[in-house]
Image (cartoon, grey):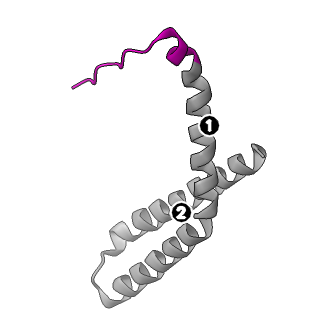
Amino acid sequence: MTMPLPRLTPEQFEAAPAEACAQVVEMLHLGREDGARLQRQANAHETSHEDRLLSGVCLPRSSSSYLAMLDGFREVERYTRRIADALE
């Protein structure tokens, strides 16, 4: 299902890239502020996963996939922080 495009006036159309850029910059700055919290959450999830793995709740076969996913989240946060720093 596709969403219909909004009808914009010429003035809105010309202002849209600047507004979109400002929103992206704002989101990057918010992401940077939450970066430490996101890193702590990923670390806590990793520790919980290791506990579940040792207790036999999780399967070793899927363990590396889960840990790789957490590393991916950490990497996205690091890149977001670098982009926000570069925009300042």
Residue at x-position 57% and y-position 48% = 27
* 18 w.r.t. 61: above or below: above
Residue 29 placement, left or right of 72: right
**13 magenta-colored:** yes
Disc 1 marks a residue whose amino acid type is Ala
**69 magenta-colored:** no
User: Residue at label 2?
Assistant: 71
User: Residue at label 1?
Assistant: 22
The segment highlighted magenta reads 1-14
Q: Nearer the viewer, residue 69 or 15?
A: 15
The quarter of the picture where the N terminus appears is top left
* 88 w.r.t. 7: above or below: below
Q: In terms of image quadrants, where is residue 50?
A: bottom left
- Label 1: few (<14), some or many (≥20) within 10 Å? few
Disc 2 marks a residue whose amino acid type is Asp
Residue at x-position 57% and y-position 53% = 76
